[in-house]
Image: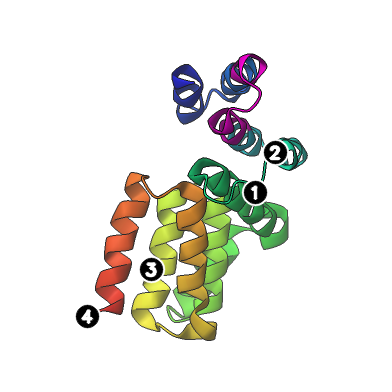
């Protein structure tokens, strides 16, 4: 499991899939291996395989690893790069109007879809800073989805949560 997690973190997706698969072969009910395998398939851009793995997992709502993988799968569908167009388009819109929150929101999703997690969080936090209640708190709600997908212990999530709290309660 440790080798699989390290491979996934290093972007060695095939190795991660192989290691998580081996862990599941030894222990078919290993929820961490299921979640890791789903994350690995998502990293490879194979949403169908990730969906298949998660569909086979028991519906443990209290398992954080599975919840993270399920949230990541939901976001992967939402942030498909082909649906969002080119990030340059959103950057150009923001150059014209820094308060174009829809362009910034779309840019955040494009960043997420491109694996630029920190940039995605930064753009959403910028919307909250500029107009907290924009589009019925869409930026804050999207941040919460990203927090779930990335996992509560992720260092980017911890830092972004602190920034969000500061923005909301200042």
Residues marked 4 and 1 touching at CB (< 8 Å): no
Residues marked 3 and 4 touching at CB (< 8 Å): no
Give the residue at mark 2: 50
Give the residue at mark 4: 170
Q: Residue at x 66, y 61 (%)?
A: 84
Mark 4 surroundings within 10 Å by alpha-carbon count, few (fewer than 14), some (14 through 19), many (20 or more)? few
Could you say which is closer to the camera, residue 84 or residue 89?
Answer: 84
| Residue 73 badge | 1
Horizontal relation, residue 78 to residue 155: left or right: right
**Which one is earlier in the sequence, the residue at label 3 or at label 4?**
3
3D distance between C-alphas at marks 2 and 1? 7 Å
Could you say which is closer to the camera, residue 165 or residue 113?
Answer: 165
Residue 109 point in image, percent of width and height: 56, 60
Residue 108 point in image, percent of width and height: 51, 62
Q: Helix, strand, or loop for circle 1? A: helix
Q: Residue at x 37, y 53 (%)?
A: 157
Horizontal relation, residue 94 to residue 59: left or right: left
Q: Does the rendering let one see residue 162?
A: yes
* Residue 32 within the segment the image draws in magenta: yes
3D distance between C-alphas at marks 1 and 3? 22 Å
**Which one is earlier in the sequence, the residue at label 4 or at label 2?**
2
Mark 2 surroundings within 10 Å by alpha-carbon count, few (fewer than 14), some (14 through 19), many (20 or more)? many
**Which one is earlier in the sequence, the residue at label 4 or at label 1?**
1
Q: Residue at x 62, y 30 (%)?
A: 37
Give the residue at mark 3: 125
With respect to residue 33, does 149 lie above or below? below
Q: Helix, strand, or loop for circle 3? A: helix
Q: Residue at x 53, y 32 (%)?
A: 32
What is the magenta range? 23-37
With respect to residue 130, does 56 lie above or below? above
Residue 47 point in image, percent of width and height: 72, 42
Residue 34 point in image, percent of width and height: 62, 32
């Amino acid at each position: 499991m440790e080798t699989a997690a390290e491979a996934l973190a290093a972007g060695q997706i095939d190795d991660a899939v192989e290691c998580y698969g081996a862990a599941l072969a030894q222990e078919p009910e290993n929820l961490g291996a299921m979640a890791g395998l789903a994350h690995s398939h998502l990293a490879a851009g194979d949403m169908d395989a990730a969906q298949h793995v998660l569909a086979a997992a028991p519906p443990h709502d209290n398992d954080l690893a599975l919840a993270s993988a399920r949230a990541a799968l939901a976001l992967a569908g939402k942030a498909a790069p082909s649906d969002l167009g080119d990030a340059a388009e959103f950057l150009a819109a923001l150059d014209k109007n820094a308060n174009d929150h829809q362009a910034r929101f779309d840019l955040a999703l494009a960043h997420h879809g491109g694996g630029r997690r920190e940039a995605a969080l930064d753009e959403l936090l910028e919307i909250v800073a500029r107009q907290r209640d924009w589009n019925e708190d869409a930026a804050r709600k999207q941040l919460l989805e990203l927090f779930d997908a990335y996992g509560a212990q992720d260092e980017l999530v911890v830092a972004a949560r602190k920034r969000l709290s500061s923005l909301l309660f200042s």
